[in-house]
Amino acid sequence: MPRAAAAPPVLVEVRRGERVESRHRGDIAVVAPEGRLLSSVGDADRFTFLRSSAKPFQLLPFVTSGRFDGYHFGNPTEALAIMAASHSGEDRHVRTVQALLREGGLSRDVLQCGIHPPLDSETAQRLLRDGEPLTPLRHNCSGKHAGFALHAKAAGWDVETYWQPAHPTQQLALEAISSLTDVPVARIATATDGCGVVTFGVPLRAVALAFARLGDPSGVADAATRSALERIRDAMMAHPELVGGERRRFDTSLMQAVRGAVVAKGGADGVQGVGVLAGKGEAVEGGAAFGFALKVEDGDFARRAGSTATCAALRQLGVLDGAASARLADYASPPIRDPRGDPAGEVRPIANLS
């Protein structure tokens, strides 16, 4: 009988008063662009669905094919950022996706991502107050879906079915994930993501490898892929507020806190990927680039464990200095307060990289 996998170690504990109230377990992998495991917590080979952390890589085939540039978007850098985003559904996000679809001769009706309220609570409350109906444009994945639809149109493929697993856009995304993670296509698990397209399952260290190559594509052999990764990375770092949002989004705040040092993209159910550029991690040998990937076992629905563990690890790796850590304090140790605003507990990291 096969031995059960060991439980992941505790990454973060939550204290209320003087007692531990809850614990979040998970795994971390830190990987060099050539695939070498540099550091870890728990099991670096833990199975992980990338979820929305895959978005920069799902966009890759649209860019490498040259079809993205064929549209001559008015602001191609913003276009790349929103297509790689899990945006908050703010008005700027909606306008950006609308502009892409309009420039590509499509309407919002093509989007098959579904409808949900904006992730940004202020925007959601305003829409509810004003009676403004929700549309797929407010969905956090509308940029990614617009990218798939526009790619399909430019290639002459069926646009209405861009979301189906057998569609060329989805097959190309699978191949891109395989190329960047070094996991053969046949060994990548596939399932349906929360927005209705394919998501990909690989070992955690493979997620970190993909982000290492996003942070530093210089070792990628194919010139078109190398150039596209650089463009996607630079667009995300130039417009972090499009990748997440103006208020309370960790990816956005992390990229703003250490401008030009990291590219970050989280995913649902406790996934976080970070690509650290060369010379930005002082504790890594030679200041080399690396990729970081984290998976919180319980899914991190309280949205506190992932950011806390990521900030702690990036401090240990020399990416976050004192000033950057101070700017990220609400993510590094999310406050627990009573109704009067007084401290009632703390969230703190436990694990150390080995």
Image: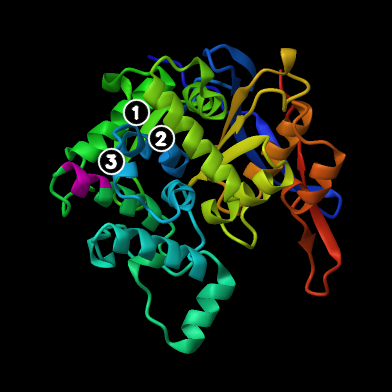
The kind of secondary structure element at disc 1 is: helix
Give the camera-side residue of 297 and 236.
236
Which residue type carries mark 2? Phe
Q: How far across and down, in percent of the image, does residue 132 sit?
A: 41, 83
Q: Mark 2 points at which residue?
A: 57
Residue 67, label in figure: 3
All told, the count of numbered labels is 3
Image quadrant where one finds the C terminus? top right
Residue 1, label in figure: none
The reply, left or right, for residue 179 in relation to residue 148 is right
Q: What segment is highlighted magenta in the picture?
A: 151-155
Tags 1 and 2 in contact by the CB under 8 Å rule?
Answer: yes
Q: How far across and down, in percent of the image, does residue 233 sit?
A: 53, 37
Q: Distance between the residues labelled 1 and 2?
A: 6 Å
Pointer 3 or 1: first along the chain: 3
Which residue type carries mark 3? Arg
Q: Mark 1 points at which residue?
A: 176
Mark 3 nearby-residue class (10 Å; few <14, some 14–19, many ≥20): some
* Residue drawn at x 31%, y 57% as measured from the top left: 113
Q: How far across and down, in percent of the image, does residue 211 sit?
A: 53, 29
